[in-house]
Amino acid sequence: DSGVTQTPKHLITATGQRVTLRCSPRSGDLSVYWYQQSLDQGLQFLIHYYNGEERAKGNILERFSAQQFPDLHSELNLSSLELGDSALYFCASSVEGLYGYTFGSGTRLTVV
Amino acid sequence: AQSVTQLGSHVSVSEGALVLLRCNYSSSVPPYLFWYVQYPNQGLQLLLKYTTGATLVKGINGFEAEFKKSETSFHLTKPSAHMSDAAEYFCAVSESTGFQKLVFGTGTRLLVSP
């Protein structure tokens, strides 16, 4: 157990739907990062939050959004889902980003 | 912009043989470098990291990597492969300032045969 908790582990939904992925960071970590892992694009950075504030955005689609709450858990919202959004979504946390992250076990999203 | 190139999407070795996974990076500032391992249906686990200081870094499970600035490389090695080492390995780079994101390579799948 890495200490980073992601729920749900698996999610199957239809095109056009909206889903929410949840991440609880390791105790004491203020930073949360979201990554998407797919076969064709590998590990892509989506977004970074630090202590409730957005710090950096990567290749995140406009249909996707995220937030970090006062208790430091984070949610990634994916809307108007397309088949191509099927992927593993990882959350990672760190005290600071410089020294590597601790990853959760991921949420496997399948859009049918 | 930073980038990472991992040579070889698949590497096959026999149990007991040397493991060498190659990683080259590009960074305009001094980099921090990382190797992660991903077992099937699991998240990524940090194997080792280079930030500053000694260029030869040792990690978990007998792995080590050497930072070579002149070659812009950070290759991962293990003297003797074990069946349990079969997994996907990712090299990553981040800038050494601020809250910088990790940029990952495309990964190398290590296959270990008996």
Image (tube, coloured by chain):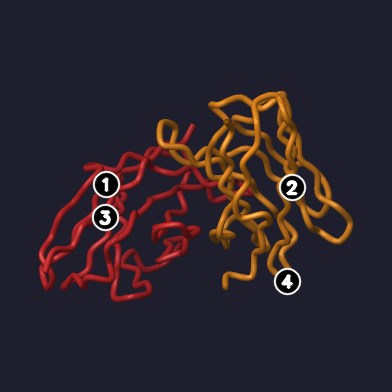
Badges 4 and 2, same chain: yes
- Give the crowd class for mark 1: few <14, some 14-19, many >=20 residues within 10 Å: few
User: Which quadrant does the C terminus of chain A fall into?
Assistant: top right
Residue position marked by numbered label 2 in the rendering: A49
- The percent position of residue B28, horizontal first and vertical second, equals 45, 37
Q: In the rendered image of this protein, which colour is used for chain B?
A: red
- Side of A76 relative to A10 (left or right): right
Residue position marked by numbered label 3 in the rendering: B75
Residue position marked by numbered label 4 in the rendering: A27
User: How far apart, in angstroms, are the residues tagged by discs 3 and 4?
Assistant: 32 Å
Above or below B56: residue B109 = above
Report the amino acid beneath label 4.
Ser
Residue position marked by numbered label 1 in the rendering: B70
Report the amino acid beneath label 1.
Ser
Badges 1 and 4, same chain: no
Q: In the rendered image of this protein, which colour is used for chain A?
A: orange
User: How far apart, in angstroms, are the residues tagged by discs 1 and 3?
Assistant: 13 Å
Mark closest to the chain's N terminus, 4 or 2: 4
Foreground mark, 2 or 3? 2
Along the line of sight, the residue nearer the viewer: A8 or B107:
A8
The chain ID associated with circle 2 is A
User: How far apart, in angstroms, are the residues tagged by discs 4 and 2?
Assistant: 15 Å
The chain ID associated with circle 4 is A
